[in-house]
Image: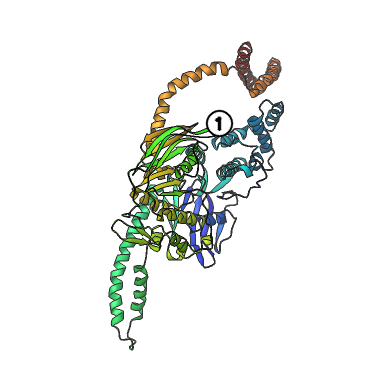
Amino acid sequence: MNFLSADNLSKSYGIRMLFDEVSFHINEGERIALSAKNGSGKTTLLKILAGKEKSDTGSVILNKDVNVLLFEQSDDFDLEQNTGECIFNHSNPILDIIRQYELLLQTNPSDPKLTELIAEMDRIDAWKVEPLVQEILSKLKIDFLEQPLKNLSGGQRKRISLAKFLIDTSLLGGHQLLVLDEPTNHLDIEMIEWLEYYLTSKNRTLILVTHDRYFLDAVCNKIIEIDEGKTYIHNGGYEIFVQNKALRIDNILSQTEKAKNLYRKELEWMRRQPKARGTKSKDRINAFNEIKEKSRYKTDQTQLQLEMQMSRLGKKIIEMKAVYKKFGEKIILENFSHYFGRGNKIGIIGNNGTGKTTFLKIIEGSEKIDSGEIELGETLRIGHFRQDSDFSDTKMRAIDYVKELAESFPLKNGKYLSATQFMELFLFGPEQQYTPIEKLSGGEKKRLQMLSVLFRNPNFLILDEPTNDLDLPTLSVLENFLNEFEGCLLVVSHDRYFMDRVTDEIMVFEGNGKINWFNGNYTEFYQNRKLQEEQKKPKAKAAEEKHSKTESKKLSYKEKRELEQLDDEIKELQNSKDELTTKLSDSSLDYEEILKISTQLEITINALSEKEDRWVELSILNESYEHD
């Protein structure tokens, strides 16, 4: 079944063309990733598919039986609302009751009103939806339903937006096309892995933009690439996409080299012709112009391989000794000691709220410690990429912003890269370099922010969620840069692929000041932890069984209601059985009537037996609990 067809879509803002003549189809069951460099209009294209924006040319044909749901990077929340009001802001009566139920569960589970809400949920059959709502809130760690939105962080609001979107999908039903723009931003690794499962557990149809390549590989079975104004379809995951793109670029470069040779020959021929004579072949001149264009083709897949002349780094970089830090009762660091050395590439992971960002602020000196000692090397030069960094003058052109930092970037061979050349390595073409910062896309601003940190030539790099809003080509460039980096690197990221590429040591914030270390990349750490969990399962299972012997005796509210209802149901079935038995004893019945009543009697007896068995089971549990 075809869900949607995009035909020759084009969109521009002023003289800037975002994309041109883009065409593709989305069929039922396809989970598609949209890939294009920053500034190519990925977000705009998703909005056009969802009917939120209009294209300049072309059309979007949507199947009349399909509902489109859009998850956007930004939100338009009323910040005076609280979390619960925002998430459950629907006209759906079932969701309204669930909201009240969830709020009482989180805030006051002993409130007598909870019994009334449970009875009302029974009446409107809300229990089918409630477990899914509970799962979404639990997995996204939303346990602050009464908190006003204005008091929450950007990451918390992002999770609220995602929860609201996923609940919408559960309520709407029917054929759905999910359109998601960077759904993994601000999610920790556990949340991302759960979202992978959620999106693939049913035959969902979706199109998304993501920078997380492991997430892309786990969720998507097709990639639509927009490159240099052309659309390419890749059936498969990220590996297939990379292989296909590499082959295409090799082919283009091969053709370009041939075109350059032909161009030189044709140029010689053109120059030899007398200007006063009209003997030049029009066909040959046209062919010359075509070859000229091919020879000028420049792929933007520049791979950054620099022999960097890093600013001098002495033997001592940063050493922390017996450091303590806490906020109120919340412990961030407790007797923490560590020596950070040259060439260390450390990935920092841990659940939100365990102190990762505070730790980075302590390292750079913007957050004071309670006690302990931090010794800094004399030649230390820290570069810090922050999640929330803003540009002071957005009217400034991108190239001028970079030149204010430095005019050039030093290389090991004694040469330098100019600001222009360095920007080209980070995929800023001439047009983008001379664009005012305010006119850049969100991803382009992040890319400019990143290269400005690196252009300062630091020898100690701190990267706090560097992959959010960056496109796949930029991430590849950044990873190559960091692989060449000889200083000390600290990375906080929920992007597992990125962590695997650039780190070889993991620092794990467990909470309450506890920090563990693992020698290896994130995948190796994850596999090791899974193995440890598997080894603990026999003990945990035994403890759980012991606990369940007492806990399972207690009947839930639903089970108590079921036990009460079984009495009435058993009486009704017993009466039906007696009536059918009486009818069957009537000697005037013909064969067909006897057969019909016998069948009904058999069904009734079986149902009665099942109800009685269930009544006995619940009664025993209830009795044993009351005796305890």
Identify the residue at horizontal 63%, vertical 37% (top origin).
145
Q: Nearer the viewer, residue 595 or 441?
A: 441
Identify the residue at horizontal 37%, vertical 66% (top origin).
297
**Image side of residue 600 versus residue 378, left or right:** right
Identify the residue at horizontal 46%, vertical 22% (top origin).
540
Q: Nearer the viewer, residue 224 or 544?
A: 544
Q: How many marks?
A: 1
Q: Amino acid at mark 1?
A: Glu
Query: At numbered mark 1, what does the secondary structure look like: helix, strand or loop?
Result: loop
Q: Nearer the viewer, residue 316 or 195?
A: 316
Q: Position of residue 11 (x, y in %)?
A: 53, 62
Q: Can residue 455 be seen by looking at this rendering? A: yes
Q: Position of residue 409 (x, y in %)?
A: 37, 58
Q: Is residue 430 above or below residue 243?
A: below
> Circle 1 sits on which residue?
329
Q: Position of residue 617 (x, y in %)?
A: 60, 16
- Looking at the image, the residue that sits furthest to the top is 627
Quadrant in the rendering for residue 575? top right
Q: How is the image coloured?
A: rainbow
Q: Position of residue 452 (x, y in %)?
A: 44, 56
